Image: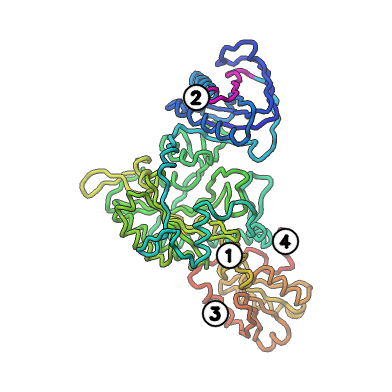
């Protein structure tokens, strides 16, 4: 069921004409006027026919929850078929709305229902506060809130093979302490704009696009390069792990039962499309990978089988007020690595290898991760020694969450998070053990016993979304601003070397140096503008360029340059060959792409 909740100053309607499915109504219901109302526009869908009472129960719960926040005087149920292209039968829809009306009335709310199946003219005034417009997807899925409340997760610190109560743990790492506080609800709130939002604009990486939906960004050449380099980096990582790259659609049909059930776990965050088919934009590459693996004949000899897709893009309909910068988006780029394993022993072995890979991304990106290790109690009891081995591998204390029972498709997962300037986690790499989707998507393999089995599936994103990687890197520069000059890792810097000319007479020599450096797969440019050397140097500093040097008469004659190294703040005398060697040593093993801008700064466009 799809609903749109509007907190209104007033709603007025007048019935015009009947449709073939119109319910019979008395004259008094042919018009209505309601002040100070929570108007619930509703579209009962085909899938809701499987469990209409579940839909009624969860819709009533959602309306009550919303009205507790907005405190409207009236609840108005307004049938609005335009919210969905996959509608239920009129009979079911009317009965659902009648049952909801009765249930809300029984809760003591002043509820009115607008007639079903009539063309109506209506006028509404939306109040315009942050909660005055809310869209929701209502499913019949059971949520045993009371049971969850009785059985909360238990939290502790895992330090190698030692379990320490949080109250007894002595924090020596303030970032772990911030993560623990945030997860337990005692730390920083999500209010406030993190510094990376300003930086992503200043450095001409990306910006909001007002002509699109919120949470969809436009990327400038420098930002596009950084994204592509990160994508290349993850590709190389997973292919080395034996992954087979694929590409799958971004739209999926919610009339497919397996997809509908899996998508329902994302509830209101489903990003639906307004078409004749009941389509949803994918929230990850899971649908595509699972569909690919459901078709071929697979035996135990093929496992573990590994698929990889870089989703440009994945979509989640995050709340408008929660979308911010690169941290939380409605459209984002997610490296999605799925491993299909024959048994739990091989699953745990692959999980361990992929944890190593996630740890390595922190090293390669020079980002500190704090870690949450999560498992159901049953999984923990059965695999305690293995979990301790992962703790030892990590080599530092991590936050441990033990869930009393499984509420999700996973039984165990590990989450790596950078901490932003405001003390909040930025979710980055993850590895998850999925014990549901093999059966749901009918993925089978022939075992050594000659019988068909469902594989266990590992979900892994070695870096998390590409946007959040960039977010982490920018937030890190803000945190360390008092300690060192801000910069990206050299291999990710859009411009790695800048040549600054003293005057017109030095341009030819600068171009010769450019050709030599560029030929070594180093991103280099030339500041050939008719500006003072001091201004050019200051400009290079604002662009966080790792290596800059000036070309004048002395340099042309000696072939030795005073190179400013941003990472250390030192000026080092080097020949061009020595500079090339240092940059190549610094970027060894990392992917390379060419300069995404004209080499001469005088010809460039300023995008901000």
**Residue placed most toward the observer, 475 or 288:** 475
User: Label 2: which residue?
Assistant: 88
**Residue placed most toward the observer, 599 or 61:** 61
Query: Which mark is nearer the camera, 1 or 3?
Result: 1
Query: Quarter-wise, where is residue 101 in the image?
Result: top right
Question: Which residue: 62% across, 84% down?
Answer: 572
First in sequence: mark 2 vs mark 4:
2
Q: Is residue 301 above or below residue 31?
A: below
Query: Which mark is nearer the camera, 2 or 4?
Result: 2
User: Residue 417: x, y in percent?
Assistant: 50, 58
Secondary structure beneath dot 3 equals: helix
The label shown at residue 581 is 3
| Magenta region, residue range | 105-119
Horizontal side, residue 409 vs residue 202: left or right:
left
User: Residue 214: x, y in percent?
Assistant: 63, 45
Secondary structure beneath dot 4 equals: loop
The label shown at residue 476 is 1
First in sequence: mark 3 vs mark 2:
2
């Amino acid at each position: 069921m799809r609903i749109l909740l509007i907190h209104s100053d007033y709603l007025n309607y007048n019935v015009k004409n009947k449709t073939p499915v119109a319910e019979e109504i008395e004259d008094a219901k042919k018009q209505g006027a309601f002040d100070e109302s929570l108007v619930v526009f509703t579209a009962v869908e085909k899938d809701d026919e499987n469990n209409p009472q579940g839909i009624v129960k969860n819709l009533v719960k959602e309306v009550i929850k919303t009205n507790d926040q907005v405190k409207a005087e009236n609840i108005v149920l307004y049938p609005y078929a335009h919210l969905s292209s996959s509608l239920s039968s009129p009979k079911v829809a009317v009965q659902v709305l009648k049952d909801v009306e009765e249930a809300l009335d029984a809760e003591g709310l002043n509820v009115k229902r607008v007639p079903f199946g009539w063309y109506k003219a209506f006028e509404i005034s939306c109040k315009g506060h942050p909660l005055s417009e809310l869209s929701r997807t209502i499913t019949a899925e059971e949520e045993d809130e009371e049971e969850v409340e009785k059985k909360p997760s238990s939290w502790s610190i895992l330090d190698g093979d030692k379990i320490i109560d949080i109250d007894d743990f002595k924090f020596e790492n303030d970032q772990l302490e911030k993560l623990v506080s945030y997860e337990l609800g005692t730390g920083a709130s999500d209010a406030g704009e993190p510094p990376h939002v300003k930086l992503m604009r200043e450095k001409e990486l990306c910006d909001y696009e007002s002509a699109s939906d919120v949470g969809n960004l436009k990327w400038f050449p420098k930002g596009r390069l950084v994204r592509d380099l990160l994508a290349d980096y993850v590709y190389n990582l997973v292919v080395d792990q034996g992954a087979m790259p694929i590409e799958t659609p971004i739209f999926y049909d919610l009339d497919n039962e397996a997809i509908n059930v899996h998508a329902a776990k994302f509830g209101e965050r489903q990003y639906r499309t307004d078409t004749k088919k009941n389509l949803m934009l994918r929230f990850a590459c899971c649908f595509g990978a699972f569909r690919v693996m459901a078709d071929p004949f697979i035996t135990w000899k093929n496992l573990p089988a590994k698929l990889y897709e870089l989703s440009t893009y994945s979509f989640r309909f995050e709340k408008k007020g929660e979308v911010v910068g690169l941290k939380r988006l409605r459209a984002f780029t997610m490296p999605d690595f799925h491993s299909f394993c024959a048994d739990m022993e091989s699953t745990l072995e692959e999980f361990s290898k992929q944890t190593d890979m996630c740890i390595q991304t922190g090293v390669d990106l020079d980002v500190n991760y704090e870690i949450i290790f999560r498992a159901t109690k049953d999984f923990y009891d059965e695999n305690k020694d293995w979990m301790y081995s992962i703790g030892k591998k990590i080599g530092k204390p991590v936050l441990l969450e033990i869930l009393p029972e499984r509420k999700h498709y996973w039984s165990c997962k590990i989450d790596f998070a950078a901490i932003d300037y405001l003390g909040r986690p930025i979710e980055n790499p993850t590895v998850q053990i999925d014990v549901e989707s093999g059966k749901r998507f009918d993925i089978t393999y022939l075992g050594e016993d000659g019988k068909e089995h469902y594989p266990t599936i590992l979900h892994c994103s070695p870096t998390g979304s590409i946007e959040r990687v960039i977010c982490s890197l920018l937030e890190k520069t803000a945190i360390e601003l008092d300690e060192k000059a801000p910069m990206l890792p050299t291999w990710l810097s859009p411009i790695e070397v800048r040549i600054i000319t003293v005057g017109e007479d030095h341009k030819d020599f600068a171009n010769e140096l450019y050709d030599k450096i560029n030929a070594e797969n180093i991103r280099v440019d030339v500041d050939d503008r008719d500006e003072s050397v001091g201004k050019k140097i200051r400009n290079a500093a604002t662009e966080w360029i790792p290596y800059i040097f000036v070309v004048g008469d002395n340099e042309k004659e000696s072939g030795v340059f005073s190179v400013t190294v941003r990472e250390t703040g030192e000026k080092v005398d080097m020949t061009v060959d020595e500079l090339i060697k240092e940059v190549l040593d610094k970027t060894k093993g990392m992917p390379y792409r060419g300069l995404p801008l004209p080499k001469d700064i005088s010809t460039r466009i300023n995008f901000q």
